[in-house]
C-alpha cells in the first residue's frame, strides 16, 4: 500500500503538479522551484514519481483551491482547478440527493423540536453540545421572530462550514487586547454565535463598569441575526448595537458587480416593561436569504431587490442570486447611495477596525474554500450614565408613533420590533413554527444525510 502524505507533502504534490504541467521541458524547473519544493536536482524526478504514488489519508480534509508554495512565501499563489485536487470531501448536496422526502410531512413544529433538530445536525459533524445549542438558540430565535431567511433556512451553511473544516466548531474566542471600555477579540474561526455571545457579554460587562463597552472581533463566521446580540444587551437594561460584514453580495451604486456584504446593523434600546425598540436591518434592499426563500418557492422577487450579471434590475430570483443585491434605497435615483454608504460604515467598524477580511476580500457566499475571517463589532451603552428616565421617554416616543392616524386604516403604524413581537405571539398561539413545505423536505433529507432523526 502506498505511504500516506503529510499535509505539507500534500501541498507540495499539488503545487508541484501545477508547475510540471505548466513547463514545456524539465530545464524550466528552476533552482528556485526546486528549493520551494524542498528538492535538490537528483531528488526532483524520484520525488515526482513517489508523490504520484501517494495518497492522502484523510478524505475529510478539504484544502483551498488557491494553494501557495509550501514555504508560504508572499508571492502570488498558483491557482488549482477543482479537478486537480486529489481528495475531495463529499458535499452535503450530493448526500442529500440520495434521499427523497416522503409525502405528507407536517409543516408546523414545536420550538423545542426545531431546536433539538438543529443541535443534532451540528453535533453530527463534531460540534460540541454547548456550541451547537448556542447556534440553535440564534436560528430558532430568527424563525420565531419571522426572519425565516436566517433560521432553519441557514442551518445547512453552518453544517457545511464545520463539515468542510473551514469553521472550527470547537474553537473558543480569545481577547487580543483590551482597555477598560474596549477590546479586540480573535474569534479563532469559531462559530459566529459562539464568538458573538462572547463579545457582547464582554461589552456588557465593560458598559456596566464604565458606561460603554465596544468590542471588535476578527476571525469570526456568520453569526445569524444581528438583533440577537443587541437584544442581549437590552435584556440587561442597556442599549445594544451589533454589526457584521458578510460575503460580497451588494453592488455599490453605479457598479455591475458586488463588492460589499449585506452588512446588517442592529440597535436596540430598552423601553418600559420589556417593550423595547429593536432595529435589525440589512444595509441592502433585502437580505440574500429572502431571495433564496423566493427561489426555493419558485416565485419572482420584487423589482429593485437585485440586479443580474449585466447590472440590470431583475425580478428573477435565480438571476438575482447570480448577479448582485442592490444597496438600501435601490437605484441611484431612489437614493441607493445612502445604503451604499451605510454598508461602507459597517466595514469601518468590522473588517477594517478589527483587521479581519473586508469588502471584496471576504470569502464568496457559500464557498468553503477558505476561512471566512469576518469582522464584527458589538457595543453596549448604559443609559444610567446619562439623563434619568430613558425608558420612560423611549416608550413615550414609540407609543406616540403607534397611536398616530395611519394612512391605511388596515395598517397601523408600527415601530422597529413590533412585527417580530407579533410573529412571536402568533407562533405561541399556533403552538409551533410553520415552515414552507420545501424547507421541510430539505430538512428531512439533511437529517438523513447526517444520520440523525428528522423533525417530528
Image (cartoon, grey):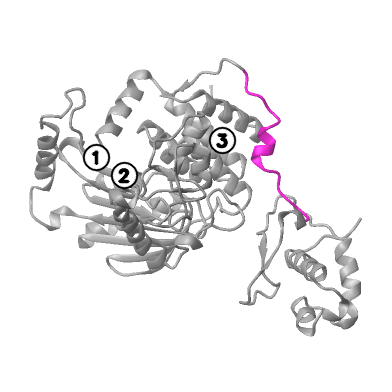
Which segment did they paint magenta? Answer: 86-102
Badge number at residue 262: none
Indicate yes or no whether the magenta region holds residue 97: yes
- Image side of residue 408 versus residue 302, left or right: left
Circle 1/circle 2 CB separation < 8 Å: yes
Name above or below for residue 447 compared with residue 244: above
Image-quadrant location for residue 175: bottom left
**Residue under circle 3?**
120
Circle 3/circle 2 CB separation < 8 Å: no
- Who's the residue at 63% across and 73% down the image? 76
- Image side of residue 132 versus residue 327, left or right: right
Of circles 3 and 2, the one toward us is 2
Indicate yes or no whether the magenta region holds residue 184: no
**Residue under circle 2?**
280
Mark 3 / mark 2, whichever is N-terminal: 3
- Who's the residue at 50% across and 63% down the image? 361
Amino acid at each position: 500500500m502506498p505511504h500516506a502524505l503529510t499535509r505539507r507533502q500534500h501541498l507540495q504534490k499539488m503545487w508541484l503538479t501545477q508547475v510540471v504541467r505548466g513547463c514545456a521541458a524539465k530545464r524550466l524547473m528552476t533552482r528556485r522551484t526546486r528549493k520551494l519544493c524542498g528538492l535538490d536536482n537528483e531528488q526532483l524526478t524520484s520525488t515526482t514519481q513517489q508523490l504520484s504514488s501517494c495518497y492522502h489519508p484523510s478524505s475529510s480534509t478539504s484544502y483551498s483551491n488557491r494553494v501557495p508554495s509550501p514555504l508560504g512565501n508572499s508571492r502570488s499563489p498558483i491557482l488549482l482547478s477543482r479537478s486537480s485536487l486529489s481528495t475531495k470531501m463529499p458535499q452535503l448536496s450530493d448526500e442529500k440527493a440520495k434521499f427523497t422526502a416522503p409525502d405528507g410531512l407536517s409543516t408546523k413544529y414545536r420550538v423545542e423540536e426545531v431546536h433539538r433538530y438543529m443541535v443534532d445536525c451540528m453535533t453530527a459533524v463534531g460540534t460540541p453540545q454547548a456550541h451547537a445549542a448556542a447556534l440553535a438558540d440564534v436560528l430558532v430565535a430568527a424563525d420565531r421572530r419571522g426572519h425565516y431567511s436566517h433560521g432553519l433556512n441557514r442551518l445547512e451553511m453552518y453544517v457545511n462550514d464545520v463539515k468542510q473544516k473551514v469553521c472550527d466548531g470547537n474553537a473558543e474566542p480569545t481577547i487580543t487586547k483590551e482597555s477598560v471600555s474596549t477590546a479586540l477579540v480573535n474569534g479563532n474561526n469559531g462559530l459566529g454565535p459562539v464568538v458573538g455571545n462572547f463579545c457582547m457579554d464582554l461589552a456588557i460587562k465593560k458598559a456596566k463598569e464604565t458606561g460603554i463597552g465596544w468590542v471588535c472581533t476578527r476571525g469570526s463566521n456568520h453569526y445569524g441575526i444581528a438583533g440577537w446580540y443587541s437584544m442581549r444587551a437590552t435584556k440587561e437594561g442597556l442599549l445594544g448595537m451589533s454589526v457584521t460584514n458578510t460575503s460580497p453580495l451588494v453592488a455599490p451604486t453605479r457598479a455591475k458587480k458586488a463588492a460589499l456584504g449585506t452588512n446588517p446593523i442592529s440597535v436596540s434600546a430598552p423601553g418600559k416593561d420589556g417593550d423595547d425598540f429593536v432595529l435589525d436591518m440589512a444595509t441592502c434592499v433585502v437580505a440574500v436569504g429572502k431571495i433564496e426563500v423566493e427561489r426555493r418557492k419558485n416565485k419572482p422577487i420584487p423589482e429593485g431587490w437585485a440586479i443580474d450579471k449585466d447590472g440590470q434590475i431583475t425580478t428573477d430570483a435565480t438571476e438575482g442570486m447570480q448577479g448582485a443585491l442592490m444597496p438600501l434605497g435601490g437605484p441611484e435615483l431612489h437614493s441607493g447611495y445612502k445604503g451604499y454608504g451605510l454598508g461602507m460604515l459597517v466595514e469601518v467598524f468590522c473588517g477594517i477596525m478589527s483587521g479581519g477580511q473586508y469588502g471584496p476580500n471576504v470569502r464568496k457566499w457559500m464557498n468553503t474554500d477558505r476561512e471566512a475571517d469576518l469582522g464584527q463589532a458589538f457595543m453596549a451603552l448604559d443609559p444610567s450614565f446619562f439623563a434619568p428616565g430613558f425608558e420612560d421617554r423611549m416608550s413615550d416616543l414609540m407609543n406616540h408613533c403607534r397611536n398616530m392616524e395611519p394612512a391605511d386604516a388596515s395598517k397601523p403604524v408600527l415601530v422597529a420590533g413590533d412585527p417580530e413581537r407579533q410573529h412571536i405571539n402568533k407562533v405561541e398561539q399556533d403552538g409551533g413554527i410553520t415552515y414552507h413545505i420545501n424547507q421541510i423536505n430539505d430538512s428531512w433529507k439533511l437529517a438523513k444525510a447526517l444520520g440523525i432523526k428528522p423533525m417530528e
